Structures are given as structure tokens and as C-alpha cells.
Amino acid sequence: MADFDVAAARSKFPALQEDQVFLDNAGGSQTLGTVIEAISDYLIKSNVQFGGGYRTSQLSSSRYNAGVEAGAKFLNARKDEIAFASSATQIFRNLSLTFQFNSGDELILSSIDHEANIAAWKDLASRQRLVIRWWRPQPNTTNPILTPESLKPLLSPKTRLVACTHASNVLGTIHDIAAITAIVHSTVPGALVCVDGVAYAPHRPVDVKQLGVDFYVLSWYKVYGPHVAMLYGSRRAQEGGRMRSLGHFFNPSETLGDKVGLGSTNYELVASLPAITAYLTPPTWSSILSHESLLQTTLLTHLLSHPTRFTIFGTPDPDPLRRLPTISFGVAGWDSRELVEEIEREAPRYGVRWGAFYSYGLVREEVGLGGLGLGEGGVVRVSLVHYNTLDEVNGFIEALEDVIAKKT
Ligand SMILES: Cc1ncc(COP(=O)(O)O)c(C=O)c1O
């Protein structure tokens, strides 16, 4: 694996000059300087409605189109398979509004997902009298994971859609989406698979064709960019009359953008996407993997070396093909909120978080149902990305130990 020049990477993010250690990257990453420049440049030089024949409008169109193209290429998709909205939550909701299923049809929802990929489908189910089948991990474990084996018994000829996450925003555990999709499509050929890739996309390249998914969602503000979210929807999923267009009756409904990207999307933000994809090239991805592997191994090794003090939630295996550096844990004798607030007082450089992170089923649900059975404080979550340094991780471990030692 290629060596990673973390100093060079950090120099590309203006916010990393601040005296703050960013350990809440699953909440939102810092933004590339080139993205900030692209947004500013768009607004200065081409901020008009695109589609017109005059020069500035043509510039606006070409910059927007370059953004759509970059977004599509990022996922190995076609331009007509991509749509944008302000947030992933919005995009799941828009997507759910396109479907008309029959009463009694079934949706399979993961119990450990972020609410964005649950609430939209629950609402659809209640409006159209659909049956929800909950896909739960094995019970009584600190390492809940969705597997093709646990999905299989839930599939039936009435299954219309399966919604799940590529990687949990709390656990960091990576799900085998290609295997999950294969089992859905081979068991119920018409069923659709909708994957929340928001937590996964900042860490590893995504190839929607290789995964075989029907829908895939990411939020660029977690992928070193601005607050705009993107939906992939395969041509297969778009065809066959399953999706109606939400657009005005006189507008085309051919592309995914026509169907779910209502009104004017965020032109200046979409136009900035080539700056992100120019940064996340294959060599960068490969060095990201090796650097993140070092970071997660360091933190997990520390937590594992004190098994009576720390409980890791998610896989304790640091293999970067099995997990991301989004690491959640509990500390014996501490409420997670109390612990994080103490770190904020004693070592405010470290921006770390406590809670359920909108994954209430996962964090709060009882262990017998595959949840973690935790109360209000939830977990302590340290979410690293490639621009974090080994010194930052070691510094955090020291700050954590200092805070714990003061109480004991
Ligand atoms: C896994 C996951 N899915 C969905 C979302 C929602 O994203 P957005 O803020 O773009 O609606 C988040 C946000 O934290 C997330 O972590």
C-alpha cells in the first residue's frame, strides 16, 4: 500500500490550521480548499440560471454538468442515474414519494440504520398500507451486523424494497452489500435495494455497479465537500413504471434528476464536486486505506488492552476491509455524556461526541432485539478520517485516560 503524506493532505483543508482536533467527522468532515474556491468562483463568474443561450448561462450549464458528471463517475454511474437534494434525509424522502406499491406489499427495513433510511419508508408504509419486516442483527451482542443469512428468511414474493446501510454511522462495521444485493435480486427479482452510503463514502471508493444496488445515497458534506446530497438510481430501477416523477407535468421525466431533483438544485455546490473527485483519485484512496488502518488499529488496540474498562461497539477487528475508523465505545462507570463533557472541560482540543447519532434502533433498542440497549448518553463516538494524525489519536487516548484516572 502507498505511504500516506498526512501533512500534504492536511494542507489542502484550510480548517485544519485551527487548534482543534476533529474527531466528529462522521457528523461532517472539513472541506477541501479547492471546493471552497470552486463555490466562490461559480458565484462570482457564473451565477445565473443555466440552460440559456447567452455566454454566462452557458458557462453555468457547463459547470453544473461537470459537477453531475463528476458525481456520477465517483460512483461509476451514468449521468441520468444521479440526482441531488439538500440532504440525504431529503433525498430518501423524495425517493419514497415516487413509489406506488400495493396494500400488503412488504418493505424490509434495517433496525440499525440512521433514521434517514427508515422514516421515509415507515411513512410510505403507513400511507400505502404496506407491511414492514424488520431486519435485525443477532441479539445480545456488542457487534450487531446485518448479514445475507439474517435477511434471507425475511424475503418473500411480496418484498418490494430492502433498505439498509453500507456502514453504520455508529459502529463503523462494513456490510457486504454486494452479497446482500445478490441474495435479494436472486430471490425476488423485482425487489429494489436502497443503500445508505453516507457513513461509508468518505472512507472507501464506491462502485454501484459492482455492488449491484438499485439506489445509493451519500452526503457530500461528509466527503470533504459542501452540504448537498446525491442519489444514485439504476436505469433498471427507474424503468418498469415503478417510479413516478415528482416533477412538473410539462417537464421531462427521463433522468433520475428529472424524477426526484425538484426545482433548482444547489448549482454552486454541485459545480464544486469535480474538486472533490480530483482529490479522491485511486492512489489517494489506496493511501487513505492504509492510513486509516493505522489510526483505527491504534485506538482499537488501546481499547482492547483494557477489556474491563472499555466496551467496543461494532467489530473490534481493525481490518480496514471490515470496518471504518468510526469507533464507538462505552467506559465502565461512566455515562457517555458525562465522559465527553469532562473531556470537553479538561481537553477542549478534542472534538468528540456522545449519543445515538440518529440511530435510535441500534443504540437504544434492547439487546434481545439486536440493539445495544443503551440509555440517553448512548456511546462515545470517535470518528476519524484520513486527515487525522497518529499524534491526534495518541493525544486523544492520553486525554481520555487522564479524565478516567481523575475519577478512579
Ligand atoms: C449514516 C447516515 N445516514 C444519513 C444521514 C443523514 O444525512 P443528511 O444530514 O445529509 O440528511 C447521516 C447523517 O449523519 C448519516 O450518518
Image (cartoon, rainbow, N blue to C red):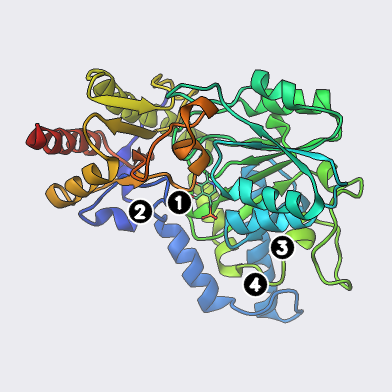
Nearer-N-terminus badge (3/1): 1
Nearer-N-terminus badge (4/1): 4
Locate residue 184, reporting x and y percent. 76, 27
State how far apart marks 4 and 1 are (Cα): 23 Å
Q: Is residue 403 above or below residue 369?
A: below
Q: As rendered, which of 214 and 374 lies closer to the eye?
A: 374
Amino acid found under the numbered disc labelled 3: Gly
Amino acid found under the numbered disc labelled 4: Ser
Residue located at (61% from left, 22% from top):
147
State how far apart marks 4 and 2 are (Cα): 26 Å
Nearer-N-terminus badge (3/2): 2
User: Which numbered disc covers residue 177?
Assistant: none
Residue located at (45% from left, 33% from top):
172
Which secondary structure lies at badge 3? Answer: loop
Residue picked out by circle 3:
261
Horizontal side of 1 relative to 244 (left or right) equals left
Locate residue 316, reporting x and y percent. 38, 21
State how far apart marks 3 and 1 are (Cα): 22 Å
Amino acid found under the numbered disc labelled 1: Tyr
Residue picked out by circle 4:
60
Q: Disc count in the image?
A: 4
- The N terminus, quarter of image: top left
- The C terminus, quarter of image: top left
Q: As rendered, which of 188 and 203 lies closer to the eye?
A: 188
Residue picked out by circle 2:
13
Which-is-in-front pick, marks 4 and 2? 2
Residue located at (81% from left, 52% from top):
128
